[in-house]
């Protein structure tokens, strides 16, 4: 399969690129190389005959039309997005332009290409989204997000992703474009840009700086190892039912405080510090606006229809992640 991956130099996108090429797929990596993208993320496959790179922005429709015409993909994985909630609070315009207008451009470029090709049955447009579109859950462990949970976004980031999801569904219903959607829980793992919680904690711990936790640390997230996520995304692309959405969860719920404490314990073993534990550096900071209390995904649909389950526990994944940062400090 020849797959066009947008955002393929970013965190999730690069994991998809690496795995797709390892499985013998051709990949066209389309990335604008903004602040959180890094071609080092795909260096392991950059010399493969199966790999092509196009530096282009999903906000540039003309560039997208050229890329579709030049490479003639069988499928699209649309992973390009602004994704950091704090940045969306400070600068929401970037999120509107990339996540909404960029998705619109991708849908229209894909639709034009698909139409010109005679609307081939095998073509797929797989849009990557987030569980944050569903809003916030109460602490009750019996309550989880399903594919039928009503959308209730609370931040500019999640609102922009919700809008992009609605566009994708509309292009399927109105134009017949063959789409798939996935909504994932919090990703973590090697190559993560150091603005998200886990890399921030690892790097600040090693630097001897305070480890900031919003509020009292009771916010709960379901943690998904990024390589497990990439595996699920390729499975949905290949075998998912057209027009359907699939929730991808790590089945690893932890409070932010539990997560940070686990990271500190791993660092205490892997790189002990003189005179105490890294947990001594934990500090609680003012909670961010609109901070959702809990996310948790019910992954029954992808498990029952496609046979997928996460393979990495959060403890194993965190250990692998910490080791990667220790091995790649530069």
Image (cartoon, rainbow, N blue to C red):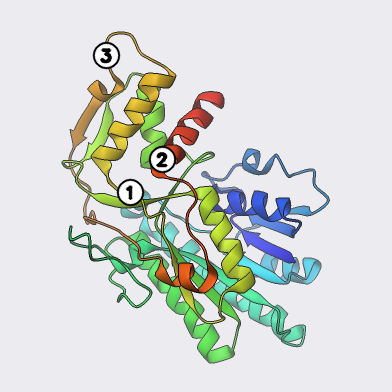
Image vertical order of residue 260 relative to residue 278, above or below:
below
Q: Which residue is mark 2?
A: 195
The quadrant where residue 295 appears? bottom left
Q: Which residue is more in the foreground, 281 or 162?
A: 281
The quadrant where residue 287 appears? top left
Q: Which residue is mark 3?
A: 276
Q: Quadrant of the C terminus?
A: top right
- Mark 2 residue element: loop
Dot 3 crowding, Cα within 10 Å, few <14, some 14–19, many 20+: few
Q: Residue furthest bottom?
A: 174
- Mark 3 residue element: loop
First along the sequence among labels 2 and 3:
2
Dot 2 crowding, Cα within 10 Å, few <14, some 14–19, many 20+: few
Q: Residue at x 70, y 84 (%)?
A: 121
Q: Disc 1, disc 2: CB below 8 Å?
A: yes
First along the sequence among labels 1 and 2:
1
Identify the mark at residue 86; answer none if there is no mark: 1
- Camera sees residue 109: no
User: Cα distance, mark 2 to mark 3?
Assistant: 26 Å
């Amino acid at each position: 399969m020849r797959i066009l991956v947008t955002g393929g130099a970013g965190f999730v996108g690069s994991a998809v690129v690496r795995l797709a090429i390892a499985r013998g797929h051709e990949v066209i990596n389309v990335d604008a190389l903004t602040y959180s993208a890094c071609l080092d993320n795909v260096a392991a496959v950059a010399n493969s005959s199966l790999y092509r790179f196009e530096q282009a922005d999903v906000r540039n429709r003309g560039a997208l039309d050229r890329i579709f015409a030049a490479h003639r993909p069988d499928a699209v994985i649309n992973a390009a997005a602004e994704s950091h909630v704090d940045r969306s609070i400070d600068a929401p315009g970037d999120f509107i332009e990339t996540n909404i207008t960029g998705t619109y451009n991708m849908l229209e470029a894909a639709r034009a290409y698909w139409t010109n090709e005679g609307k081939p049955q095998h073509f797929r447009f797989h849009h990557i989204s987030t569980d944050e579109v569903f809003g916030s859950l109460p602490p009750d462990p019996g309550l989880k997000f399903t594919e039928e949970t009503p959308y209730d976004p609370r931040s500019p980031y999640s609102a922009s992703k919700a809008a992009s999801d609605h566009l994708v569904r509309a292009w399927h219903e109105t134009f017949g474009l063959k789409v798939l959607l996935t909504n994932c829980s919090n990703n973590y793992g090697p190559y993560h840009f150091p603005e998200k919680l886990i890399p921030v904690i690892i790097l600040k711990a090693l630097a001897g700086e305070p480890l900031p936790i919003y509020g009292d640390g009771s916010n709960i997230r379901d943690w998904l190892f990024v390589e497990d996520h990439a595996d699920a995304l390729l499975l949905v692309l290949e075998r998912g039912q057209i027009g359907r959405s699939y929730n991808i969860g790590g089945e690893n719920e932890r409070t932010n405080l539990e997560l940070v404490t686990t990271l500190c314990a791993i660092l205490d073993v892997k790189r002990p510090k003189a005179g105490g534990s890294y947990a001594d550096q934990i500090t609680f900071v003012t909670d961010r606006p609109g901070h959702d209390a809990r996310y948790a995904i019910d992954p029954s649909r992808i498990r029952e229809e496609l046979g997928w389950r996460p393979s990495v526990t959060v403890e194993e994944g965190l250990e692998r992640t910490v080791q990667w940062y220790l091995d790649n400090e530069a």
